[in-house]
């Protein structure tokens, strides 16, 4: 199941877990309408998914990513 979901363009992260769920996935959608479409038509079309819980991220305080090296002291770019 996780391998199949990993091919969904909307999902940035898919992993097997332990506990009350067996999968966790992080979807990136530009707005709530796109999220709704993905939940109802993308994930909703996957017959193996019997239940689903969502928790939208309302605000991101810190994210890991790359930064341009130009203009940063001590870095070549």
Image: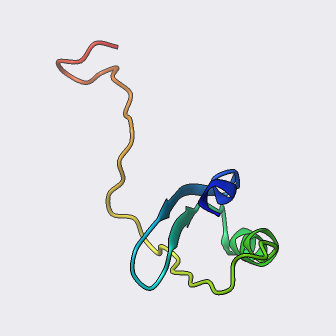
Q: Where residue 16 sits: x, y (%)?
A: 48, 64
- Vertical side of 40 occupied by 16: above or below: above
- Vertical side of 52 occupied by 42: above or below: above
Instruction: Depth check: give the residue in front, 69 or 16.
Output: 16
The structure residue drawn at horizontal position 40% and vertical position 74%, both measured from the top left corner, is 18
Residue furthest to the top: 76
Instruction: Depth check: give the residue in front, 35 or 53.
Output: 53
Q: Where residue 22 sits: x, y (%)?
A: 50, 74
The structure residue drawn at horizontal position 52% and vertical position 70%, both measured from the top left corner, is 23
- Vertical side of 35 occupied by 61: above or below: above
User: Along the horizontal axis of the image, is 73 left or right of 4?
Assistant: left
The structure residue drawn at horizontal position 56% and vertical position 84%, both measured from the top left corner, is 53
Image quadrant for the C terminus? top left
Q: Quadrant of residue 8?
A: bottom right
Q: Quadrant of residue 25?
A: bottom right
Q: Where residue 71 sits: x, y (%)?
A: 29, 21
Image quadrant for the N terminus? bottom right
- Vertical side of 53 occupied by 35: above or below: above
User: Along the horizontal axis of the image, is 4 left or right of 61?
Assistant: right
Instruction: Depth check: give the residue in front, 54 or 56.
Output: 54
- How are the residues colored? rainbow
The number of discs equals 0
The structure residue drawn at horizontal position 64% and vertical position 87%, both measured from the top left corner, is 51
């Amino acid at each position: 199941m996780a391998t199949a979901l990993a091919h969904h363009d909307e999902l940035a992260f898919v992993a097997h877990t332990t506990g009350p769920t067996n999968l966790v996935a992080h979807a990136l959608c530009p707005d709530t309408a796109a999220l709704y479409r993905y939940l109802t038509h993308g994930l909703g079309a996957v017959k193996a998914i019997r239940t689903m819980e969502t928790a939208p991220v309302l605000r991101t305080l810190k994210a890991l990513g790359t930064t341009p090296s130009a203009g940063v002291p001590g870095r070549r770019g």
